[in-house]
Amino acid sequence: MTFRQVSLGLACVTTIAVTLCAQEQGQHPSNAKPIDSTNHFVIHLQEGFYQSQQVVIAVDGREVYRAIPKTRDVLGLATTVQITNASVNPLVVFSIPSTSVTWSNRIDLAKGAALGISLTKNGQVRVLQSTNFYYD
């Protein structure tokens, strides 16, 4: 066997291996999830929870939190709520039942799995979606 035959053989094997790898990668995109997978995200109750009022959070119609959070001034965080959900676009509903404060929105978990909810001094809900927050 000559050097040229060995080189051609190695080149063919390498080409086949690269082609097979490329086809395999094409079939399994990195962001694909199985149909029955679950999604995880965290709701951070952050600034403005000083009035000792009960907060209720529901995700896709399921109540996931009911308590009286209190913001810790050092962190600017009252509490976090871990959520496991089947939907990648869950409907999040936040309310303070003793007042008219309510907020709801369908979120896209591809934009970040951390949802920060704060209350302004005039009772408005402020929401920020991120991959994480500075205190994480």
Image: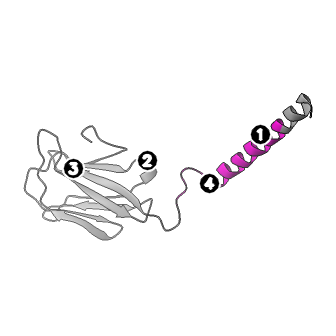
Q: Are marks 1 and 3 in contact (CB under 8 Å)?
A: no
Query: Where does residue 27 sit, x and y in percent of width and height?
Result: 66, 55
Which residue is rendered at x = 38% and y = 64% of the image? 85
Total residue callouts = 4
The disc at residue 28 is 4
Dot 1 corresponds to which residue?
A: 14
Disc 2 to disc 1, how far (Cα)? Answer: 38 Å
- Nearer to us of marks 3 and 4 is 4
The disc at residue 124 is 3
Which residue is rendered at x = 14% and y = 44% of the image? 121
Q: Is residue 117 above or below residue 101?
A: above
Query: By what rule are the colours in the image chosen?
Result: one colour
Main secondary-structure element of the magenta-colored stretch: helix
Q: Which of marks 2 and 1 is nearer the N terminus?
A: 1
For disc 1, the neighbor class at 10 Å (few under 14, some 14 to 19, many from 20) is: few
Residues shaded magenta: 10-33
Dot 2 corresponds to which residue?
A: 111
- Nearer to us of marks 4 and 1 is 1
Question: Could you say whether the residue bearing mark 2 is in a helix, strand or loop?
Answer: helix
Looking at the rendering, which quadrant does residue 73 occupy? Answer: top left
Q: Residue type at mark 3: give it.
A: Gln
Q: In this view, does 46 lie above or below 2?
A: below
Q: Which of marks 3 and 2 is nearer the N terminus?
A: 2
